[in-house]
Image: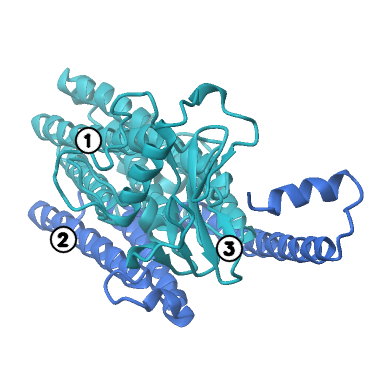
Chain colours: A blue, B cyan
Amino acid sequence: MGHGNYEEAKKLVWRGCLVLAVITLIEVAVSLFQKGHLVPGMEDISAVTFGAALIIGALSIYKAYYIIYKFMHMAHEVPGLRMSVLLPVLLLVWGMIAFFQEGGAWGKRRAVIKERNKMESEKSIKPIGMLLEKEQKIFTIK
Amino acid sequence: MAHDTAVHDEVHGHDHSHGNETNKELWGGGKEPFKASYGKLMMWYFLLSDAFTFAGFLIAYGALRFSSPSWPVPDYVFSTAPFGIHNAPLIFVTFMSFLLIISSVTMVRAVQEGARENQRGVVFWMLLTIVGGAGFLGCQAWEWNNLIGKECMTVTRNPFGTHITNGTYLNVDGTPSSDADDKFKAGGGFLIHRAHLGDHGGGHGHGDDGHGHELTAEEKFLEAAHASLSTQNLDMDNLPETGMDFPGFHLNNEGFIQRKFIGDNGVAEAQAFGPKSFGALFFFITGFHGFHVLSGVVFLIIIMLNAAGGIYVARKNGYEMVEKIGLYWHFVDLVWVFVFLVFYLL
């Protein structure tokens, strides 16, 4: 604001609108491609789904950068302010690694329990204890 | 305070050479840390803390999704739009994203006009921003209404399931269906419909929406299921606790029709409800974001009225209040980028 020519700044804003709109359209297209809506069968290729997820994630982060730097004028703030707001966000990287790892472990655990329950019911041994009974209820599809 | 700063500037000129300032000058008061006003600085830190709240929600979504053997397919869940549009994956939410992007752009324009003390410009662009925000809220209200009212999703119930094996659906009489649309692959999504016995026109709109289109295999099945249920004279409010079993489907105690299918293992099973946490996560996270949009719109209206009333003209600080609400509004757009990513795109 107040930086440079007013007419030029106005133009930059509409350019920003175009950039965000086009990136959003690309994201939606990649997502539909990933789910097999554009080319059938793509949803079964794990390399495609993984790659598409990476592309969409990277584009979203670019959009976030664009909004913060161009629309919220973070570029015009002093480095101290910039760092004190942006650096703490890096903690979330650790949060994501830790919790996604944990979520995956819960998933594996559930699969193990399901498998074990199946084996036990095949041996026609009744599960003993409250917890097992409860778990079996959850994983038996009515 | 503003006066002190002005005096300071006169003493040092505008060459930004603060290197030779003594400690006394720095700590003498009237100097803004990070060269940002108190209000703006605190808005940044509020937004930082808010970002952590949203990140906590979204990371919880990720952890629960990874822990679940199946998860509703978003492009299947969010494939309806107003005016009876079906099978249009992500189109409506993309429109919602555009509304927020455009309102963010009009907000930047309002801040620019504020910087050059153009009162009319500020009010005009803020008004457009408010229209965009209100439009977004309207779209979200429609989306929620559709999910709750038509598709029967609640915080504790998720009728959107995902197939975990390949298979073929059964007809109402229990024989395997020969319709090609009744074959499915693992990973495909399905919606468990609630039977609408007794409630006239129950809002499901399947088969009786008057569009005269050819019925899908699913719609044909639901019609046949309803026909067979209507002969039973059931009291929908007092169904048996374990539900009722029919050759081609299971009617659970809440009146949902869970279709039966034969999977890869050759055993007939009924459709299972999707992971419960999906409904809770969806309503809490999009609701929390919607609440931000709502409070943003309220603040925008207040500040627009103040601007129109000339309050900020007297302050002569380049409409800083508009700048601060602008930061908040861009943040709402920023959060939507990630809500959109996590809920709809991935």
According to the picture, the residue beneath numbered tag 2 turns out to be A15
Q: Residues within 10 Å of mark 2 (few under 14, many from 20)?
A: few
Chain of the residue under label 1: B
Q: Mark 3 vs mark 2: same chain?
A: yes
The image quadrant where one finds the C terminus of chain B is bottom left
Q: Amino acid at mark 2?
A: Arg
The answer to whether residue B23 is above or below residue B71 is above
Q: Between marks 3 and 1, how big is the CA–CA gap?
A: 34 Å
Of the two numbered discs 3 and 1 in the rendering, the one whose residue sits closer to the viewer: 1
Q: Between marks 3 and 2, how big is the CA–CA gap?
A: 31 Å
Residue at x-position 89% and y-position 59%: A125
Residue at x-position 35% and y-position 52%: B218
According to the picture, the residue beneath numbered tag 3 turns out to be A93
According to the picture, the residue beneath numbered tag 1 turns out to be B135
Of the two numbered discs 1 and 2 in the rendering, the one whose residue sits closer to the viewer: 1
Chain of the residue under label 2: A
Element type at mark 1: helix
Observer-nearest of B253 and B305: B253
Element type at mark 3: helix
Residue B175 lies left or right of residue B134; in this view the side is: right
Q: Between marks 1 and 2, how big is the CA–CA gap?
A: 23 Å
Q: Residues within 10 Å of mark 1 (few under 14, many from 20)?
A: some
Residue at x-position 43% and y-position 35%: B229
Q: Amino acid at mark 1?
A: Gly
Q: Residues within 10 Å of mark 3 (few under 14, many from 20)?
A: few
Earlier in the chain: of badge 3 and badge 2, it is 2
Chain of the residue under label 3: A
- Residue A102 is situated, as x and y percent measured from the top left of the image, at 70, 61
